[in-house]
Amino acid sequence: MSNDTLSGAASTAPATPSTAPAPVTATDPAARAVATGPGRPGPRSGLLLGTILGGLFMALLDVFIVNVAAPTIRADLHASGAALQMVVAGYTIAYAVLLITGARLGDLLGHRRMFLTGLSVFTAASLACGLAGTTGELIGFRFVQGAGSALMIPQVLSLLQLNFRGDARTRAMSAYSAVIASGAALGQSLGGVLVSADLFGTGWRPVFLVNVPIGVVLLALAPRVLPKDPRTAPERRRGLDLPGLVALGAAVTLLTVPLVLGQEEGWPLWGFVCLGLSVLVFAVFAVVERRLTRRGGAPLVSGRVLRAPGMIRSVALLMLAMAVNAGFLFAVALHLQTGLGYSALRTGLTFAITAVVFGGTSLYWRRLPSRWWGRLAPAGMGLAALALAVVGLALRGGGGGGAAFYAGLVLLGAGLGLSFSPTFALALAQVAPQDAADASGLLATVTQLGQLAGVATLGTVYLNRLGSGVGAHHSAHAYAVTSVALIAVAVLGVVVASVRGSSAGSAG
């Protein structure tokens, strides 16, 4: 399978925790964790929310927008398969490795300052990517783009945490969830539009250059609407934990690089060696963090975050949900383009259906009765499993699937939306405000790894079954096998989401 057709995985980041809850009347324990008081947005809160979510959306868009431009990039820059993979994946690798550090830097130096820094780096790197003349330059600038995102995205959660309360925070978090839920599919859709338009004969370059005017507008707005960072007493400032940073960076790199490049390189021995070493280095990281905690230091991830109600359960569920999302987008995009001969534009627009429903569900789930909130995650994963079955059956004959295919896309968007936003809001409501940065960095990294794992495992099922075969029926058979694996992961998500009790990190 040519690397031209490879697609990436969805990018998400965790929802912000709540402050101490106000008295509520909800009867469901999980609902009480979210219903933290009425809250009233300030006069500029809408502009503030739009500014920080604009930066978030732009950064998340770039995880996907390159996928449909890959064939054009390869032809224009004469890129090898491995080099093209690094163009696509370099952003994600830098993003995943540096997210927790970006969260800590915001906690240390100020969330406003780091948001502006990350936005500036991202915008400048986008311009450089759009003007790159060689594959090497493009790869390097993509890494810089990812670093800018890692500095910017964790600050979004902390700024929401600090500037919104009660119902206002819940509404802000619903909007946040809708943005990150829709970034994946809309990224592919917009990428397809821009590449197909070939504006002024620039080919693939607008997929990067589109960020520049948006970034400039946000940079003009942000200093006016973002509140100034509060002064932190020297005794309350936490250090950067450089040993932990080095260990975590090495562990995540050892894990992500073989996951990204393994299929393209034929799963060589070095890939399995790196995966094995990543387990060892993660263990070293845990030891380093434990020793730092015993000495009274400030580890990258506070133990309080891991012990927060719902955290472990949420980590497992988000890993599974993002693996399903990423594996589905990957396999179906390949089937539509290579099996059915869809254009990049048509393929991208197809996923917009799921994105719109996903985003809408993430926005409006809180309008359901509060007694239902704790049951939305298992119901959502169950609905996702049903949707995957509908899509698999619709595509099995080698055709476009008709109305059943599009019905499956709608159901999948609703199912993942119901499991996504409530999981964040209900399970993380108990995380202390001072741990917001650590929680945001941790879960953003976890979801990135889940997406990479989804492509590397579920996506590889499709590629291995496809082999060197060609034609719609051969591709449909490969996807049918993949759909069984996707359904199995979704069902496992139902089981994880249904676990209750403190030992499982219940949201209640």
Image: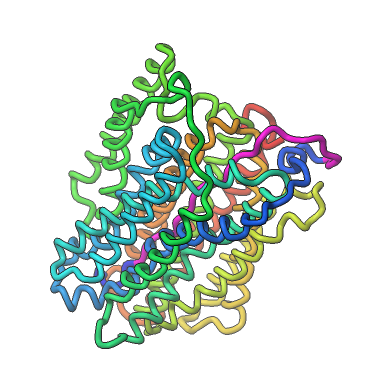
Report the front residue among 420 and 106. 106
> What's the magenta region?
7-27
Kindly identify the residue that appears in the image at 58 percent across and 71 percent down.
409
Report the front residue among 376 and 46. 46
Left or right, residue 146 beside residue 415 = left
Q: Is residue 101 above or below residue 233?
A: below
User: Magenta segment, principal secondary structure?
Assistant: loop
Does residue 266 appear anywhere in the picture? yes
Does residue 416 appear anywhere in the picture? no
Q: Is residue 243 above or below residue 87?
A: above
Q: Quadrant of the N terminus?
A: bottom left
Kindly identify the residue that appears in the image at 56 percent across and 77 percent down.
394
Describe the colour scheme in one phrase: rainbow
Kindly identify the residue that appears in the image at 31 percent across and 47 percent down.
256
Q: In the rendering, at what x and y percent does residue 306 appear?
A: 53, 29
> Is residue 102 in the magenta section?
no
Q: Is residue 44 above or below residue 229?
A: below
Q: In the rendering, at what x and y percent does residue 273 appear?
A: 22, 39
> Is residue 19 in the magenta section?
yes
Q: In the rendering, at what x and y percent does residue 47 appear?
A: 58, 60
Count of numbered labels shown in the rendering: 0
Left or right, residue 46 beside residue 114 = right
Left or right, residue 428 beside residue 302 = right
Q: Quadrant of the C terminus?
A: top right
Report the front residue among 246 and 172. 172
User: Quadrant of residue 326 in the image?
Assistant: bottom left
User: Quadrant of residue 55 in the image?
Assistant: bottom left
Q: In this view, does 373 lie above or below 135?
A: above
Q: In the rendering, at what x and y percent does residue 65 appear?
A: 37, 69
